[in-house]
Amino acid sequence: MSDTLPVLVLSTCPDQTSADAIALALVEEGLAACVTRIPGARSTYRWQGRIEHATEVQLLIKTRVTISGALIKRLTELHPYELPEVVVVEPRDVSEPYMRWVNEQTPDR
């Protein structure tokens, strides 16, 4: 396996229970090397013509660019929202040891 760049996938969940379940599934299934959960995020957004406010759990999902499509598919299947946030952020620079670790945790599919 050659090392491929890690990417950061951003998503939010409505509560800690769904965030924990998604994080565990993605790591157990080898789709993510790590999922950081940040509770207490406040979101303001327009949904179905109304301004909404919600307290959410921000997910920072670390994976490889080559399997991000499979991760997005699985995240969407697991997610309780009708329209989950899924944003892939590509890095400018990544340390070599961290890149190797992410690659080791997320095998080729």
Image (spheres, helix red, strand yellow):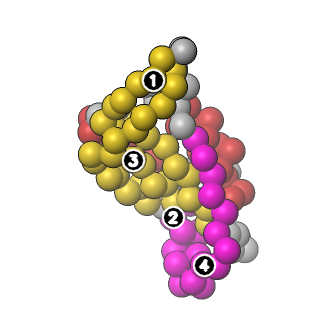
Q: Is residue 68 left or right of residue 34?
A: right
Which residues are the magenta region? Answer: 86-107
**Residue 54 screen position, x and y as percent:** 34, 31
* Residue on which the image places disc 2: 105
Residue type, mark 3 in image: Gln
Q: For the residue labelled by badge 2, is the local secondary structure a helix, a strand or a loop?
A: helix
- How far apart marks 1 and 4 lie (CA) works out to 37 Å
Which residue shows up at 60% across the image and 47% down it? 87
Q: CA distance from mark 4 to mark 3?
A: 22 Å
Marks 4 and 3: which is nearer the front?
3
Residue at the image position 34 percent from the left and 52 percent from the top: 37
Earlier sequence position, callout 4 versus callout 2:
4
State which mark lies toward you, 2 or 3.
3
In this orientation, which residue lies closer to the viewer: 47 or 7? 47
Q: Which residue is mark 3?
A: 58
Residue 91, labelled with which disc?
Answer: none
**Mark 3: secondary structure:** strand
**Amino acid of disc 1:** Ile
Residue with the mark numbered 4: 94
First in sequence: mark 2 vs mark 1: 1
Residue sitting at 62 percent across and 35 percent down? 73
Residue 104 occupies quadrant? bottom right
Q: Nearer the viewer, mark 2 or mark 1?
A: 1
For residue 101: magenta?
yes
Q: Position of residue 79 (x, y in %)?
A: 46, 30
Classify mark 1: helix, strand or loop.
Answer: strand
Residue bearing the label numbered 1: 51
Mark 4 surroundings within 10 Å by alpha-carbon count, few (fewer than 14), some (14 through 19), many (20 or more): few
Q: Is 57 on the left-hand or right-hand side of 25?
A: left
Viewport quadrant of the N terminus = bottom right
Is 19 above or below relative to 10?
above
